[in-house]
Amino acid sequence: MTRHYSDGSVEALAWEDVVEVRVGGADHGDAKDAQDDDADVLIVLLDREGEGCVVPRSATDATFLARLRYLPDFDLDRLSSAVETAHSGYVVVWRSPEPPSPLPDLEYD
């Protein structure tokens, strides 16, 4: 996933590194206004180090949504609900399953 900004800066995150997806946006006093102005809604993809890529809802397309569906157990309905009710805070809509626990240290004779 790559996002190019008008100032020339670039955010990039490999899909296989995505461990969390959040949704948030500008705080609107009227819920109807929040639904009408999805340009203020942001979808944030994060990796394990907290680095990420911010994607405005207005910049998403079918390819982006299809790629999200490949994340294990990703729920597009949950994403849609979060986008419709977005406010100034962020809501986690998906988190990668925890990595498997490490094998115990074994002692050999």
Image (cartoon, rainbow, N blue to C red):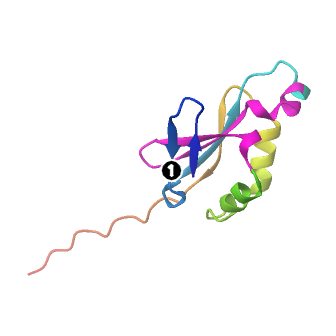
Residue furthest out toward the top = 29
Q: Is residue 54 magenta?
A: yes
Residue assigned mark 1 = 13
Q: Is residue 26 magenta?
A: no
- Tell me what residue is drawn at x 88 percent, y 31 percent: 36
Position of the C terminus by quadrant: bottom left
Picture coordinates of residue 63 (x, y %)? 72, 59
In this rendering, is residue 107 above or below 2? below
Q: Nearer the viewer, residue 15 or 89?
A: 15
Q: Which residues are magenta?
A: 33-60
In this rendering, is residue 89 above or below 54? above
Classify residue 87 by image quadrant: top right
Residue type at mark 1: give it: Leu
Circle 1 packing at 10 Å, graded few (<14), some (14-19), many (20+), is: some
Classify residue 96 by image quadrant: bottom right
- Tell me what residue is drawn at x 12 percent, y 79 percent: 108
In this rendering, is residue 40 above or below 15? above
- Say left or right for 13 vs 90: left
- Tell me what residue is drawn at x 72 percent, y 62 percent: 66
Picture coordinates of residue 41 (x, y %)? 73, 34
Picture coordinates of residue 60 (x, y %)? 73, 47
Q: Is residue 104 visible?
A: yes
Residue furthest out toward the right = 32
Q: Nearer the viewer, residue 107 or 73?
A: 73
Classify residue 25 by image quadrant: top right
